Image: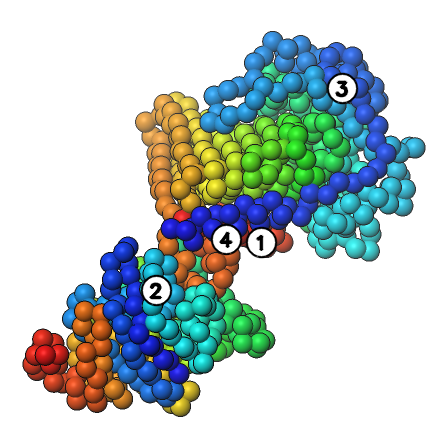
Amino acid sequence: MPAVSETIETVQSVQEGGYKWGFETDIEMEFAPKGLNEAIVRFISRKKNEPEWLLEWRLKAFALWRKMEEPRWAAVNFPPIDYQDAHYYAAPKQKAAPKSLDEVDPELLRTYEKLGIPLREQERLQGIAVDAVFDSVSVATTFKERLEQEGIIFCSISEAVQKHPELVREYLGSVVPQADNFFAALNSAVFTDGSFVYIPKGVRCPMELSTYFRINARSTGQFERTLIIADAGSHVSYLEGCTAPMRDENQLHAAVVELVALDDATIKYSTVQNWYPGDAEGRGGIYNFVTKRGACRGARSKISWTQVETGSAITWKYPSCILQGDDSVGEFYSVAITNNRQQADTGTKMFHIGRNTRSTIVSKGISAGRGQNTYRGLVKISPKAHGARNFTQCDSLLIGDQCGAHTVPYIENRCLTAKVEHEATTSRIAEDQLFYCRQRGLSEEEAVGLIVNGFCREVLKELPMEFAVEAQKLLAISLEGSVG
Amino acid sequence: MLKIEGLTAEVEGRPILKGIDLEVPAGEVHAVMGPNGSGKSTLSYVLAGREGYEITGGRVTFDGRDLLAMEPEERAAAGLFLAFQYPVELPGVGNANFLRTALNAVRRARGEPELDAMQFLKLARAKLKALHMSEEMIKRNVNVGFSGGEKKRNEVLQMALLEPKLAILDETDSGLDIDALKIVADGVNAMRGPGFSALVITHYQRLLDHIVPDRVHVLMDGRIVKSGPASLALELEAEGYAKVAA
């Protein structure tokens, strides 16, 4: 039907014109020379004034990485990446580390304002503490003093290395070891900044913690490292948002996130990923190759991942849970949208080790344009995980007839008393649904937004409220006008 | 209110409507009766602007405007409502949210202020009460898991909220038991007045016992072959389409 192709064109134009975070900040930057070698690793470590043990740790990772090969098992296609043709360190030039926000370059503050993340005292987001990471470095963290009163540490990982080396040394790489995979090894060698969180025993973090990642500089990669430790009986909710300028080159984002939950601790980790997705022909966009993993080390601990993935040219990420503690709980709620030429291969891994461990996986994949969307997940139950339970639900929604949805669930159950359930559906936005909505007065855009939000409702309700509203708008923008 | 002149339409190259002339003045309820395959549903979809129907001739004016040039949502905003023969399910979409979005879209188009969640709820409760429907109706997802009768009642609720100038009821009586039929008919009758017209499309006479039309039109093979007062429906019931049309 001609109206369908017409609306698909509308989606494409909206998508191209619709990435309103695509601006570039003009600011004086300091770069490491292009390329990746031992000298660069040493350069980064020196820049950050790191202790010897961390430099050794990085060099070991670099040596491992050189022997590893880029994984190619995911259902994504991309030309070979020249790892020597990028800067591994890019930072806004500052005379000295800013002691307060007054010393932060106003151009940077304006950038975050434009992104809707005001950092200045009087304009801060209520109830959300923000760590703002700009290319390779953290430029500001808000509400630090308020959090310190509770004994909570929330700072950039570079600062944590200086001020809390014992914690960093104990936990860094303890969930995602250097040799875990190609991108994790690369990150371990060259990570430049990221957020660090420690919640002391029994403390319930009084506000949402959040990191806002921004890639700005040309020809650079972003390699951030986030480490969150929730001590016994503590509770924290952490949010992560990301954007990047519109460029015709592909940029690499290879982050590592490690979470550790001790006895009775809960970590809720939410992501709204909106990296630049590339244009309609697939030029440009971020390669989002990320390793995220949480360890439920303590009994009755809980780690919950919620992600809304709308951006990036390619997404390769599997936020996972290692359920070691007895009665520990892992959750993964995901919405992934691919439009135009976007490709996503995302899912989770749930490792059931402790007794009575439980996991829930709810994945909603939406494909439009020529997008390719794959759910890939592993549920592994060890022989000792008596009474373990998993429930998995994977739903795919197709918009148009040139996109694809794929579901690749792996289940390895070695325990007779464990129970694993898997459900999967694939559907389309039907013409009659759209017509029904339009007959009631909704525009095509409103109708698609409503139907898609309905499809994703189970996941969106897991997001903190401020984020849920943002995520709903983002879903509508990513898919405006599409018809199936 | 609605004026159809020489309307012809095709579906996949097959002529279905072969020259319809029909006028529904403001404040009147007209019935269109016809056997299966006569073009009843095509007529309602063409008037509402559904994709896949090619208009090959004729014109339709609605409230003085060229209806066929308008998008489906513009027709809705102008006050045209179609009660579907098979209401569509929208999984995960709450009925209250859907109704409010629809109402606000229409209000926006009319230049009226939008209703917030509280204002909407107050209005919806009043309408539910008037229609003798439970509040559960708006708490569920749009038509998901609704029985046939519940779906039709939901259509009537939407009509009551959107307050259209013209409602087209496309075989709203099909699959309804007598109680549901009465609720639907009461809903339509409650709206009757100088600012409300309806086109009741049906195969059988029984709905017209409850919604007594001002005029009845007989549609056969894509044309209106006979028009008359309400009693024409009884004649059709007694003698069959073939004889009446002959």
Residue A307 in sight: no
Of labels 2 and 4, the one closer to you? 2
Is the same chain shared between marks 1 and 2? no
Determine the residue positioned at 45% across, 81% down. Answer: B64
First in sequence: mark 1 or mark 4? Answer: 1
Residue A481, which numbered label?
A: 4
State the separation of the CA atoms marked 4 and 3: 41 Å
Q: Secondary structure at mark 3?
A: loop
Q: Nearer the viewer, mark 1 or mark 3?
A: 3
**Rendered residue at 49%/62% (across/down):** A443
- Kind of residue at disc 2: Ile
Mark 4: secondary structure:
loop
Question: Which label sits in the foreground, 2 or 3?
Answer: 2
The picture places residue B88, in percent across and down from the top left corner, at: 34, 60
Q: 10 Å neighbourhood of mark 2: few (<14), some, or many (≥20)?
A: some
Chain letter of the residue carrying label 3? A
Pick the front one: A430 or B114: A430
Q: Which mark is residue A473?
A: 1
The residue wearing badge 2 is B55
